Image (cartoon, rainbow, N blue to C red):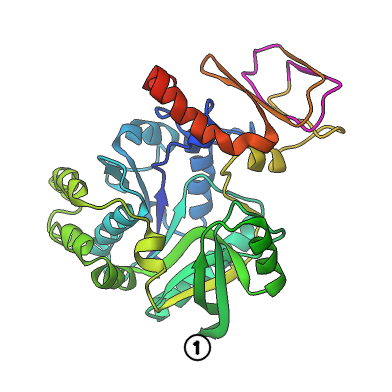
Amino acid sequence: MNKNNYALIMAGGVGSRFWPVSRTEYPKQFIDFFGIGKTLIQSTYDRFLKICPPENIFIVTNEIYTDIIKTQLPDIQDNQILAEPIMRNTAPCIAYGSMKISELNPDAVIVVAPSDHTIADLDSFVAAIEESLEAAAQNDCLITLGIKPSRPDTGYGYIQYVDNTLASDPRIHKVKLFTEKPNLELAKSFIQSGDFLWNAGIFIWSAKAINNAFHKHLPEMHEIFQSGLSLYNTLKESAFISDAYQQCTNISIDFGIMEKANNVYVLPADFGWSDLGTWASIYDMAEKDYVGNAVIPSEKVMMFDSSNCMVNVPKDKLVILQGLHDYIVVESNNILLVCPRSEEQSVKQIVADIKSKHGAKFI
């Protein structure tokens, strides 16, 4: 296993679309949605053990989740947990992680990935990451993985690519355009064109390439984190980061760098990827009965004349559903949500309204 391979797993989100199961104090990355005995972050960590030495896997998260991470990932050392004092989107956390890793190993090649995705074909995933790491080690480029779309989905961002490829790897194409979530007609045209991919939010680059990209495209942020070079991986790191984050703008890596840089490439891939962004994505992946009901767990849920429902309730709760079709039924933390599947995108706004009316205790 290549000692220069590193992974930076982003685990700081609150997953409000999965409320009430996902709560601010215990968000979705720490939950076992499918009853498989592993949470999403545990599954993500296990995937990267096939790619990086265990000491080269770093978790960046909000500081309120460090104890959960230590419990769920007991092999992770304190130095491998990057605790953010406040949420500032993905650019600051990647700047922090890249600087910290480059101080440990200037020749590092880093894969950055969310903690809450699912992968059906592990072998294909590992092969795609290893191919990208090798290309990133040999070229001054920023690589992202693009998923070959199976449908005109309006819930994903898209990447358009051109025929130009890396000289060292003809499968890795130069990116022409990043597009945010399109409407249905536009998504259909993307699929028909054949040169668009879903944006998986998984990035691969050398520490040198990404630090140079920050210097060029987000110079103020680069300067903030560069000023702490002598403090990374020391006892003074935490205090420095606490101050640094107060100075950072809230900006994503996509908008801050990937959409601006001229050395961005994409590897088209297909490994059964889902970003688990909504209850619909859980429903799509879950086992269903003969009328399309996905019930997790199913021990004490009884369905009568009901179909195509997504049900997630405590395993000791007796639940009877009669005459319900195409609904989401979720109970957790003494909160019950009943919502048509067609309106699940409103859950995030519902959470905001609840916070406004009742405060943060239910969020």
Relative to residue 14, is residue 172 depicted above or below? below
Q: Find residue 62 and report its image quarter.
A: top left
Judging from the image, what secondary structure is the residue with disc 1 in?
loop
Q: Is residue 270 visible?
A: no
> Which residue occupies the foreground of this view, 242 or 47?
242
Q: Is residue 302 magenta?
A: yes
Q: Residue at x 28, y 43 (%)?
A: 84
x, y (%) of residue 106? 26, 69
Q: Is residue 311 visible?
A: yes
Does 117 sit left or right of 309 as displayed?
left
Q: Residue at x 37, y 43 (%)?
A: 76
Does 322 sit left or right of 276 as displayed?
right
Local packing at callout 1 (Cα closer than 10 Å; few below 14, some 14-19, many 20+) is: few
Q: Find residue 147 and report its image quarter.
A: bottom right
Q: Is residue 23 magenta?
A: no
x, y (%) of residue 86? 27, 40
Task: Write down the residue under mark 1.
Answer: 167
Does 270 sit left or right of 16 as displayed?
right
x, y (%) of residue 272? 66, 55
Relative to residue 152, is residue 326 depicted above or below? above
Which corner quadrant holds the C terminus? top left
The stretch in magenta equals 299-318
Q: Main secondary structure of the magenta part?
A: loop
